[in-house]
Image (spheres, rainbow, N blue to C red):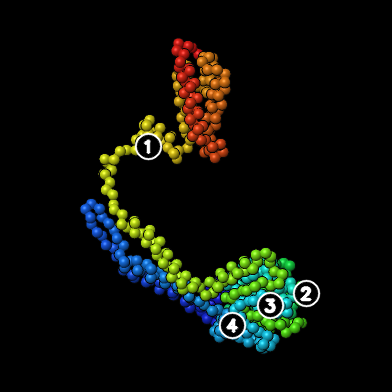
Amino acid sequence: MMNGGSMGHSPLSDGNDKSLSTRTMACVVTMSKNLRLSTKIVSNGDARVKWLTIRYLIACAVVLTLALAGSATVHAAPFDPAGRDWEGYADFVKLLRDEVGGSRVVVSNQIDWNAVHANDALLLVYPDHSVDSSSVGAFVRAGGRLALLDDFGAGDDLLGSFGIQRVPLPARPALALRDNPDLPIADPGPNPTPLTQGVDRVVTNHASGLRQPLLNTVLRVRAADGSEVPLALSASSGDGRLVAVGDPSIVMNSMLRYAGNREFAKNLAHYLTDGRDAGPVHVVVRSFTETGAYRGAGGPGHEWFTALRQAGASVGQDGLPGWVLYWLTFIVTSLVLAWIIPRTARTYRSLPPRFTRPTPTLAQGGAAGHAAALGAAQAYRGHAMIEWRRAFVEDLTGYFGLPGDASSAEVVRRIARLGAVDAEAIRAIERLLLRMAEIDTMIAARQTHALEPIRDDEVLAAGRLVRQVLGLVHGKPGQTA
């Protein structure tokens, strides 16, 4: 059985069994590969219409229905309270009843928080959905006793409500069953507790570590390098008690044959029930529903959120109802058909030969292609600004008879000396040339992200100013600079 960590392999087997869900998915994939899908080509002059056959549509619907229905109906039952196989919990439930009394142990798949009292105990094993942590917290604060046995289930939120974090166990434990690092051996923590009385070692199976420095370490796994990671933590406040164990498999049928595991299971039974009236011990395993809320838990809207979470848990446990699967399959199939049919019925357009098509301006090269590249929608506008600068400087250096490497400042001085442009326009030219020089420098350094965004209106304004100045300068023929 593959599901998370501790359910990977039995300590008594080689662990080669395939899960039912894996075999089911293999059947679906094989069926989809073996289905013969065909198409029919209908010729109509130069147009060819490709139709999807009824056989293909039926095959899609069958595979989709099997996948949806199979995902909702395949179940596994590790830690089954009535299970007699190696990962069942029948021996543990019997041990609980022998230790605290048969009538006190109640195995249930539902938690009715309105019926739970402060002198009750709750043994929660590998929940497959999030638990109402507000109700659990209120229950423990009121004097209730909680034991959570979970390694890779959905107990993260519940652990987090007590400040507990999941951490990996040492990759190289100091002690392991048959030298298998996935089966580390835990020993009691540094401070003796009723939970470890008579316990020397506990064999684990694909477990998860826990961390909360403020809680008492009940069991720990030592590493070969001398470090250690807690496996089980406990805390008490008044009559309320909390036990968190990072491995629900330590008390399953195949593990209770180890003396330390069995003794720990007995201590856990008494830890949850000693010193109080004969309240029941609720044993809740994996899939369950919650109703109501414990007194004083949550706030406004808590019951609404609880009902929503319970609906999600019901879907996870029992799957979607048949009518929902039917309509879901119908809707998905209709959407697929609505997408496929228009595309498969579309005629192929005849295109002229490539050598007869007009060449786009961008691909023509020369001045036209260069201008089209600068004006393209996706082009960076900084290159257009640089083009205006080059055109402006090159035109005026030739007009004034300046060398080709003349600076922009020298060009501006010649314009001012010419007297064709007023002082305000001279300042505008200086600002524009400075902005263009900054853009040119940043493009060369590939740091354009540091520039202010260059928009189309800025490029157009620069072009208008350049053309205006050039027109004024060239409008005074015979003048010398």
Q: Secondary structure at mark 2?
A: loop
Q: Tell me the tag on residue 81.
A: 4
Rounded to the nearest whole Å, what is the CA distance between mark 2 and mark 1? Answer: 81 Å
Question: Residue 198 placed where, x, y %?
Answer: 71, 83
Q: Earlier in the sequence, mark 4 or mark 2?
A: 4
Q: Earlier in the sequence, mark 3 or mark 4?
A: 4
Residue 230 in view here: no
| Upstream in sequence: badge 2 or badge 1 | 2
What residue occupies the far left of the structure in this picture?
A: 45
Residue occupying the point 41% across, 36% down = 373
Secondary structure of the residue carrying numbered label 1:
helix
Q: Which residue type carries mark 3?
A: Val
Q: CA distance from mark 2 to mark 3?
A: 18 Å
The three-letter code of the residue at mark 2 reads Gly
Q: Which residue is mark 1?
A: 362
Q: Amino acid at mark 1?
A: Leu
Query: Circle 2 sits on which residue?
Result: 238
In the rendered image of this protein, does residue 370 appear above or below residue 127? above
Mark 1 neighbour density, 10 Å: few (under 14) some (14–19) many (20 or more): some
Circle 3: element type: loop
Q: Between marks 4 and 2, how big is the CA–CA gap?
A: 30 Å
Separation of marks 1 and 4 at Cα, in angstroms? 74 Å
- Mark 1 and mark 3 lie on one chain; the one further toward the N terminus is 3
Is residue 11 found left or right of 241 in the rendered image? left
Residue 265: x and y in percent read: 66, 82
Query: Which one is in front in this view, the residue at disc 1 or the one at disc 3?
Result: 3
Residue identified by numbered label 3: 116
